[in-house]
Image (cartoon, grey):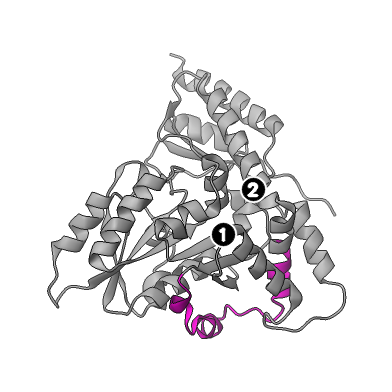
Amino acid sequence: MSFPTVEQFASDNYSGVCPEALDYMLKANEGSAPAYGDDIWTQKAADYFRELFEIDCEVFFVFNGTAANSLSLASLCQSYHSVICHEIAHIETDECGAPEFASNGSKLLLGKGPNGKLTADSIETIVQKRNDIHYPKPKVISLTQATEVGTLYTIDELQAIRAVADRHNLRIHMDGARFANAIAAMNVRPAEITWKCGIDVLCFCGTKNGMAVGEAILFFDKALAEDFAYRCKQAGQLASKMRFIAAPWVGLLETGAWLSNAQHANDCAAYLEQQLAKIPGVELLFPREVNGVFVQIPEAAIAALREKGWLFYTFIGTEGVRFMCSWASTQERIDRLVEDLQQVMRLVESP
């Protein structure tokens, strides 16, 4: 049975499983193995992460990003605490209240900042707003790398935020839904923009990077991971056949596909950005730094593109469009999208 190809730039979640992840999942399927993470694949994956990040961190695997973010945040604060995040952070706009649910009520305090990034000053303002017992006490800063609008926190920005955190005894969580894309774009070692900048826990996404399912949670401060395995079990996130989450990670990390997949997605987005810039009436909304291109086009053009079968998201204003590239994106498909957009733009802008 064959299925039609989806013409999409909606999300890197839409892409299939990359060959390296699939190959190692098949390897893990040979024979039996201990359950609940006591297998060699889970141990290998955890050790690869420790090698990659140059630190003896605690590593856990869960099914999805919502669980990774919510459970890790819950481990960093109590129900009477609060988490500072950007007003368009994924944990605020797209987690259905899961961080609050997992933490038994920790409140999200929303900050502003250009291009989807919190600033040290905006965090300071939130922390200083109130310090009485009637207000949830700030305890955690949550940063998204790369951000929801495809921008990047620089090392200097991360260090400035860590300085604020140190002054107020705050922990820092990093939502790394597209962390691999950030590393590829910045050309730095993973340690340089995580624990060396004071990040306490990182949620490293595998699904958007070519896996079928699975996220890694890295506690750089091992003391913060106390009893975290119990939290995962209670939340239904302890996979009985854990090797089928861990083995694809081994495939990505051992072969280097985690980085080459991200670089390919970034390169495709850069090419798409260049082609879109040639179309009159198409305006870039945010700097293109990783694998997403955010543009403004007329609503009529958006509707016309969708009539042609293209899938994409429009959550940045009524005329804002996000085109997202993945490890599986191709120049041929980008060219088809650009050609169709050129056609509809001529139609909607003609008198």
* Farthest residue, direction top: 351
Any part of residue 109 in sight: no
Q: Is residue 251 left or right of residue 225?
A: right
Callout 2: few (<14), some (14-19), or many (20+) C-alpha neighbours within 10 Å? many
Q: Amino acid at mark 1?
A: Phe
**Can you identify the residue that label 1 sits on?**
53
Is 205 in front, or is 259? 259
Q: Amino acid at mark 2?
A: Leu
- Identify the image quadrant of residue 331: top right
Any part of residue 309 in sight: yes
Q: Percent position (x, y) of residue 345?
A: 50, 22
Q: Percent position (x, y) of residue 286?
A: 41, 35
* Farthest residue, direction right: 31
Image point 62% across, 24% down: which residue?
Answer: 339
Above or below: residue 155 compared with residue 46: above
Q: Is residue 246 left or right of residue 68?
A: right
Q: Quadrant of the C terminus?
A: top left
Q: Mark 1 or mark 2, which has the lower sequence index? A: 1
Marks 1/2: CA distance?
14 Å
The tag on residue 259 is 2
